Amino acid sequence: MDKKKAVALRVVKKLRQHGFSAYFVGGYVRDMLMRKAPKDIDIATDARPQQIKEVFKEKIYSVGAKFGTLLLVKGNNVFQISSFRGKRKSYSRSLDRDLNLRDFTINALAYEPIKKKTIDLVGGRKDIRDKTIRAVGDAHARFKEDPLRLIRAIRLECTLGFKIEKDTFLAIKEMAAAVKKVSRERLRDELTLIFTSANPGRGMKLLDESGLLKEVLPEVDSLKGVEQPRAFHPEGDVFAHTLLMMKKLKKPSLALAFSCLLHDIGKPATFQVSDRIRFSGHDKAGAQISDNILKRLRFSNKDRKDIVSCIENHMRMMEAPKMRESTLIRLFCRPTFDTELELHRIDCLASHKDLSVWRFLQRKYRGFKKAVQIPKPLLDGYELIKIGFTPGPIFGKIHRQLIDQQMEGKIKNKSQAQKWVCRTFIKEKLDAQT
């Protein structure tokens, strides 16, 4: 028995010593029957939240008041303990009723850890064997109790490789609008699990077919029907292109997943027809739209910054073969370069399939071996003042160009730097002083 399970067993025994019943429930039991290593152990009991707190004097926190859920911290282990589901004022709560109020049959299983017995009242074991995601009882009632279950069904299909049963999926389509009642943080977490799963393309397709996509990501839904030039995008409109990119992902990082999903989100706003269909500035427009979407979904500042940066710069890759060495080095030193390079590769594969620029970047990048650092300018601000420059915007311009000269090996010491600065910026120096 692993250590976490042993600790969880002691939690169950302690609840029972105080006269309460307690069982392992939910995902732990499902994963155990699937012969997968369970990540978490959730415990259900007939004890009320206040009674649970009285039993355990350790660190215990309320996390789901609506469902009577507490988190118990024991050493390095964290357990979710929930009171049996049922009407809040009812004193007839039981394991039977609890399991019948859970979301899907594959999650409505209990395990008696002392007798080592699985309890299945709703056909969960059969649905696990059949790889089926089926709502417990009346699907509409289950989704009404917690609309997050609408999108959780999609997540389970993507992460488990199961298929949503037809009546359950029909209920999702009929109730899709109810997902708007779910907190943005909970939506973000489910979307993250979907798009970083082994099958994010399937997730996007299911979100679209169910009607959930236009409710949670209307900007992505608006990509439908936005035509693209066939010479570069034989795959079809912007939505088709984005879906194809998502289908090419398999367990991507969060930054790569959402960069692929949102990289062309600025195209509807920048669509124009001149000599051909063009989307001038869609990278910049898309970065701003993406920033708003990620703020709305309460992404962390770092995740939001990384994703927006990838989107804002995704068109720069095409210019790489014409870049100066110093510009390439700056590109390679970007903290999101690895993600940007993979975004470019997938973008190409989902459109014109020309990987020549990607191969060029790969070759150059291997040469720099990631270890290249942008050097500090050989002349700092104090030294520029000694030469005769007045502090101001010109300092930034001098430093940027000086660093380029250093990275290209044209300037190697302070003496060379001083001569180059005086020769290159003497006119701007005089202009700034008049």
Image (cartoon, grey):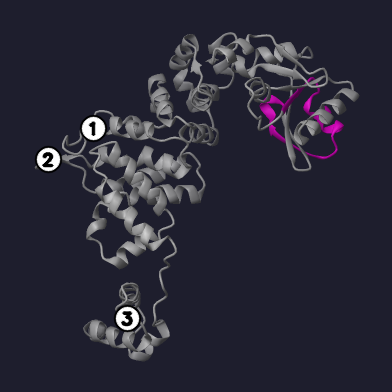
User: Could you say which disc has been placed on residue 276 in the image?
Assistant: 2
Instruction: Give the mark nearest the N terminus, 3 or 2.
Output: 2
Residue 54 part of the magenta segment = yes
Point out the stretch of residues depicted in magenta.
Answer: 42-68
Q: Quadrant of the C terminus?
A: bottom left
Q: Which residue is mark 1?
A: 226
Instruction: Please tell me whether residue 347 is drawn above or below residue 165 in the rendered image.
Output: below
Q: Residue at x 64, y 23 (%)?
A: 35
Kind of residue indicated by mark 3: Ile
Q: Is residue 110 left or right of residue 193?
A: right
Q: Residue at x 49, y 17 (%)?
A: 163
| Foreground pick, 210 / 330 | 330
Kind of residue indicated by mark 1: Val
Kind of residue indicated by mark 2: Arg
Mark 3 residue element? loop
| Foreground pick, 184 / 193 | 193
Q: Are marks 3 and 2 in contact (CB under 8 Å)?
A: no
Task: Say which of marks 1 and 3 sits in front.
Answer: 3
Q: Quadrant of residue 289?
A: top left
Across and down, in percent, residue 351 comes to 25, 37
Instruction: Give the mark nearest the N terminus, 2 or 1.
Output: 1
Mark 1 residue element? loop
Q: Are marks 1 and 3 in contact (CB under 8 Å)?
A: no
Q: Which residue is mark 3?
A: 411
Q: Decide: few, some or many residues near mark 2? Use Cα within 10 Å; few <14, some 14-19, many ≥20.
A: few
Q: Quadrant of the N terminus?
A: top right
